[in-house]
Image (cartoon, rainbow, N blue to C red):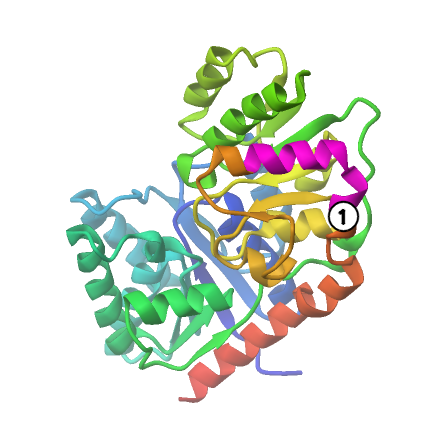
Amino acid sequence: MAQQLRILHCFRSPVGGIFRHVRDLTQAQVAAGHQVGIVCDSTTGGAHEARLFAEIEPQLALGIHRTPIQRNIGLGDIAAAWRTYKIIKQLQPDVLHGHGAKGGVYARMFGSLLRVSRSRVARLYSPHGGSLHYDEQTMFGRTVFAIERLMERFTTDQLLFVSEHEMRAFVSKVGQPKAPYRLVYNGLRAEEFEPVSPNTDAADFLYIGMMRDLKGPDIFIDALAKAENALSRPLKAVMVGDGDDLPHYKAQAAGLGLADRITFHPAMPARQAFALGRVIVVPSRAEAMPYIVLEALAAGMPMIATKVGGIPEILGPSSPALIRPGSADALAERMVEAIDDPQGLHNAMPSPEALQTRFGADVMAREIEKAYFDALAR
């Protein structure tokens, strides 16, 4: 058996793809004999996330430690950073793996402080999109990327990218990495490659994701209205997810006369949600490597998705399922095509078997473990 490691994952918000990624990693790392823990924000997430924490907490020898960590940079970071540092110092990890912008800063900064006190700790960073979504033409974006450049050069032992697109974005906006780096795709568990059949009363279209503009729920709602007009008949949709902007999207649906045809549900397990719709729509304005795309395809669902981030790496760059981002017209047009020719959209999807060889959780965990030992060896 390989050396047992004390691994601590640090990230801000326990929702969405980052949380899914960390949960999968912790379970695989525990199964490999490592001691694992989590440090994250205590102010985000709801009942669904609480259930997910309860499922994994008994497996984590280093525990789950939640403390307030604000999203934006501000004075509150001083108190949050001090609280987080005390937690990390007490746990004495061998590996500090930061996920997302804030988690990446904390993990690498505090790992460096631990090294000053002669602790042996590897500092790894997975951006998961995060700060890379900012515009390098703005003053704020340039400031963020300057910080990223300094952090990468002086406090990073290994960079882990979840898609080629994310890797290219880092090189373009931050610069060619000085630290070692590698591409490790997100992965799914074997049981997730089982088909899900839609309910008999399933809606025409399904949105699953955080209720924030970056993920495009507003585009989804506008496109549904346009598709109805083009087809001259009503369509049904389901939207699953939580977020501060949820009331805004409900008002948008009502304003377009769709209140009786769009059903909103709180966050739930993805495979449970898949049965609620016949075609999943991913209208994101930006992404890194979204789990929801992998999960839906593994479950045998047809999909319409924007051509952003790592999505073309999953579907194929010329897939007819891809549309340009930010366009309700383009999405509506593809929705109409999906209604008129549902089998054609099905046929455009990659097979679950092909996906499993590239996007398996076992492959992901094995490659990341190699990165940990490589970082410690240096």
Q: The residue tagged with tag 1: helix, strand or loop?
A: loop
Q: Where the N terminus falls, by quadrant? A: bottom right
Q: Is residue 347 above or below residue 239?
A: below
Residue 240 included in the magenta stretch of the image: no
The amino acid type found where label 1 is placed reads Ala
With 254 as the anchor, is 316 left or right in this view? right
Q: Position of residue 57 (x, y in %)?
A: 58, 49
Magenta region: 331-346
Mark 1 nearby-residue class (10 Å; few <14, some 14–19, many ≥20) = many
**How many numbered marks appear?**
1
Q: Is residue 205 above or below residue 271?
A: above
Q: Nearer the viewer, residue 29 or 62?
A: 29
Magenta stretch, main secondary structure class: helix
Residue at 77% x, 58% y is 352
- Give the camera-side residue of 321 and 131: 321
Taking the spot 48% from the left edge, 85% from the top edge, the residue there is 374
Return the x and y of residue 6 as percentages of the image width and height: 49, 70
Please say if 129 is above or below 338. Answer: below
Tell me if I can see residue 209 in this picture: no
Q: Which residue is mark 1?
A: 299
Quarter assignment of residue 366: bottom right
> Is 333 covered by the magenta stretch?
yes
Depicted 88 relative to depicted 252: above or below: below
Which residue is painted at 61% across and 59% down in the image?
A: 318
- Looking at the rendering, in which quadrant would you find the C terminus? bottom left
